[in-house]
Image (cartoon, rainbow, N blue to C red):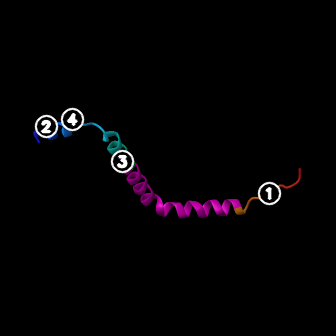
Amino acid sequence: MIDWFRNFGDDDSGAVTVDWVVLTASVCGLVALAMAGLQGNMTSIGQKVEVFLSGQDINSTF
């Protein structure tokens, strides 16, 4: 039984998967945090873009 614990502690298989899960979770958390911080500003930026683009003329003559 003691040998089983030693082998279990020395086994590296699956370590990369754990690293990727932690990395992916941290990136998702940072994106969610950034989106929460920018949520109020996105509406005003979108409205400004809408006003600008609606005032533009499209030249359809070639």
Q: Does the magenta stretch include residue 36?
A: yes
Identify the residue position indicated by label 1 in the image. Answer: 58
| N-term-proximal mark, 3 vs 1 | 3
Q: Which of marks 4 and 2 is nearer the N terminus?
A: 2
Position of 50 compared to 36: left or right? right
Q: Nearer the viewer, mark 2 or mark 3?
A: 2
Which numbered dot is residue 21? Answer: 3
Label 2 secondary element:
helix
Label 3: which secondary element: helix
- Mark 4 vs mark 3, foreground winner is 4
Local secondary structure at mark 1? loop
For the residues labelled 4 and 3, the Cα–Cα distance comes to 21 Å
CA gap between label 4 and label 1 equals 68 Å
Amino acid type of disc 4? Asp
Residue 54 location in percent, x, y? Answer: 71, 63
Residue 57 as seen in the image, left or right of residue 16: right
The magenta-colored residue range is 25-53
* Circle 1: residue type: Ile
